[in-house]
Image (spheres, grey):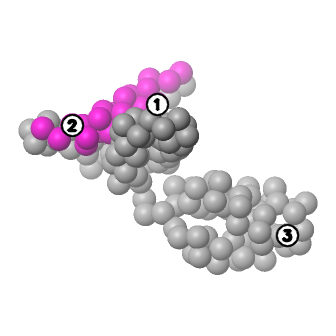
């Protein structure tokens, strides 16, 4: 079952259950997927890789908005963003822990032959491709800097 089909089914369930929190997050996902399908140059169906990228973008937006609301002491809006973020994250592949990322990146550093921070580009290119959807780019970057320092 495609992600779009799954989202539509879950929207129906949330509507029947009158679950406003889930409905908000699900509608955000549906909207973003529709936009991705109708983008210029997009095919009829979007790939699973594109779906994951769209979901990651939505999660990142929610995190950034939540941080802004938190600094402005708007706990009501902060809570809404966090709830939507959790719902969106439930449709993403399981995220790797920092320890798992570190172990994996040590292997990537060995394979690419990186020795200093100057080689960070090589490591990041490989790591971002291989860990797409499994780890946040910001976390990957932080760990790579730490390991190459």
Which residue is tagged 3? 149
Circle 2 SS class: helix
Residue 107: in magenta span? no
- Residue 71: give x, y in percent of width and height: 55, 40
* Residue 13 seen from this side: yes
- Residue 101: give x, y in percent of width and height: 61, 70
What mark, if any, has residue 36 been given in the picture?
1
| Marked residue nearer the N-terminal end (1 or 3) | 1
Q: Residue at x 42, y 32 (%)?
A: 32
Specify the quadrant of the image occupied by residue 121: bottom right
| Marked residue nearer the N-terminal end (2 or 1) | 2
Which residue is tagged 2? 20
Circle 3 SS class: loop
Q: Which is closer to the viewer, label 2 or label 1? A: 2
Question: What span is colored magenta in the figure?
Answer: 18-40
Residue 26: in magenta span? yes
């Amino acid at each position: 079952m495609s992600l779009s089909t799954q989202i539509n089914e879950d929207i129906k369930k949330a509507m029947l259950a009158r679950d406003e929190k889930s409905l908000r997050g699900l509608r955000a996902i549906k909207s973003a997927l529709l936009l991705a399908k109708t983008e210029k140059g997009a095919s009829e169906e979007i790939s699973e890789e594109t779906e994951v990228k769209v979901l990651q973008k939505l999660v990142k937006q929610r995190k950034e908005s939540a941080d802004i609301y938190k600094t402005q002491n708007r706990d009501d809006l902060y809570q809404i963003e966090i709830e939507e973020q959790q719902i969106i994250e439930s449709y993403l592949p399981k995220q790797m822990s920092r320890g798992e990322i570190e172990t994996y990146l040590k292997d990537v550093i060995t394979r690419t032959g990186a020795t200093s921070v100057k080689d960070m580009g090589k490591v990041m290119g490989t790591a971002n491709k291989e860990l797409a959807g499994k780890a946040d780019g910001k976390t990957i970057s932080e760990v790579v800097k730490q390991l190459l320092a």
